[in-house]
Amino acid sequence: MRLKDKVVIVTGASKGIGEAVSLALASEGANLVLASRSIKKEDRVVKEIENMGRQALIQQVDVGNSSQVSEMVNRALETYGHIDALFNNAGIFKPAMLWKMTPDQWEEVLRINLSGSFYCLQAVAKPMIDQKKGSIINVTSSAGLMGTIGQINYTAAKGGVYAMTKSAAKELARYNIRVNTISPLAETDMTQVIASDPKFKEKYLERIPLKRFGKPEEIGPAVVFLVSDESSYITGQTLCIDGGMIMP
């Protein structure tokens, strides 16, 4: 198995891309810390990982709360003794045109998507520096790379994640810690508004050369690769998994 006994923290693990990536990592031999505000032992992702014979540590956490993030990382270290990778995936979506956006819509999206990503990155970096190895995969989006209408809060947050990854990759490379970003486009609760509206869907599909939305399961192999030792010479990069919509 490519990831045999590696320990990976996955935030936003209870559904969508987080769930699919968690299952992909477990199928390759990883043990997981499944982090989400709402995750429970009864959730499908937990049961499936345990059926694979892998361990799944459940942690209910608000990533926008630095104390809760620190507690999550400490529990992971107490349980497994080390952390090999972080899939920094938790995010929320509160769309509005900029002149209609409330302070709460702006601040909450920045708190979870940007500050939360930073808190998780910072918390795992410390033990990874001690062990002198690790892989961190942050999640940006096409909104953060090229902008989009009605999502200025989300765009700002995901653009910040993209830029933050570059600095973190340069700071942590001396410790053999790799930091990369993926930009996925898949059918999830967050994209359901687009996929379910014929006009929005048509406009989006016009921008995608492969003419379809991805499935969450199609994101997993890329994350497995970035966690694995096969990507040992890759850092500071952004992998767009979006059917060709963005071609840097």
Image: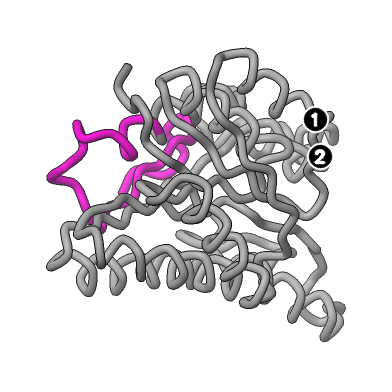
Q: Which residue does the image show at 70% across and 27% down from the upper left?
A: 45
- Compared with 96, 39 (above or below) is above
Task: Measuring from the top left, give residue 148's x and y in whole percent.
Answer: 62, 60
Magenta segment range? 224-248
Q: Is residue 231 above or below residue 134?
A: above
Which percent across, then down, holds residue 19? 65, 32
Within the image, what quadrant is residue 195 found in? top right
Question: What number is the disc on residue 40?
Answer: 2
In the rendered view, does 13 fall on the left or right side of 189?
left
For the residue marked with disc 2, what is the amino acid? Answer: Lys
Residue displayed at 31% across by 50% down: 135
- Work out whether residue 214 can be spotted: no
- Give percent across and percent down for residue 191: 73, 41
**In screen coordinates, is 108 left or right of 184?**
right
- Using the rendered image of the protein, determine whether residue 217 is visible from the camera's viewpoint: yes
Residue 103 lies in what quarter of the image? bottom right
